[in-house]
Image: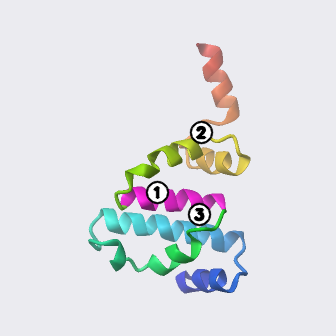
Amino acid sequence: MWKQVENAIEKGNAGETEIYGAAWQLIFDSWLYIFGYYKESEGSIFSHLADLTREMDAPPLRIAHCIRDLAYGDESRIDDLVSMVHSEDPQYREIFETCLWRSTSKEEIKTREKK
């Protein structure tokens, strides 16, 4: 599956499934690095995929790249991740709500009403 995702992106025919698959692989790469599977980003088995997808504008990939950059020590990306989590863009919002990183609109309204 990993190579299929990479090949689809290389050929320019990646759909939503491949985009999310690539994002998952980049986050998995972050875990591998954090847990010491390799010590330098150059050792990453996903470095080619990261290069292929770095400039793609799909929210899942933007989030995954941000998390990966943070995992590799790029603290300048903290504000980017916070902005994405708080974004009102429906694509970002849906991802973070689904991952339970952000309350739903209804939950946010209830919280404001309690104050």
Residue 50, percent across and down?
50, 73
Asked if residue 82 lies left or right of residue 94, the reply is: left
Above or below, 20 relative to 98: below
Above or below, 3 relative to 62: below
Residue 25, percent across and down?
50, 71
Quarter of the figure with the C terminus = top right
Label 2: few (<14), some or many (≥20) within 10 Å? some
Which badge, 2 or 3, is on the more N-terminal residue? 3
Label 1: few (<14), some or many (≥20) within 10 Å? many
Helix, strand or loop at mark 2: helix
Give the amino acid at mark 2.
His
Helix, strand or loop at mark 1: helix
Give the amino acid at mark 1.
Ile
Residue 67 shows which numbered tag? 1
Which quadrant would residue 88 be assigned to in this image? top right
Instruction: Give whichever of 75, 1 is nearer the camera.
Output: 75
Which quadrant would residue 83 be assigned to in this image? top right
Residue 60, percent across and down?
61, 60
Residue beneath the point at 53% across and 81% down: 2
Asked if residue 20 lies left or right of residue 81, the reply is: right
Magenta extent: 58-71
Instruction: Give whichever of 2, 14 is nearer the camera.
Output: 14
Residue 42 shows which numbered tag? none
Which badge, 3 or 1, is on the more N-terminal residue? 3
Structural distance between the alpha carbons of marks 3 and 1? 10 Å
Structural distance between the alpha carbons of marks 1 and 2? 15 Å
Instruction: Give whichever of 51, 104 is nearer the camera.
Output: 51
Residue 61 shows which numbered tag? 3
Quarter of the figure with the N terminus = bottom right
Label 2 belongs to which residue?
A: 86
Residue beneath the point at 53% across and 43% down: 101
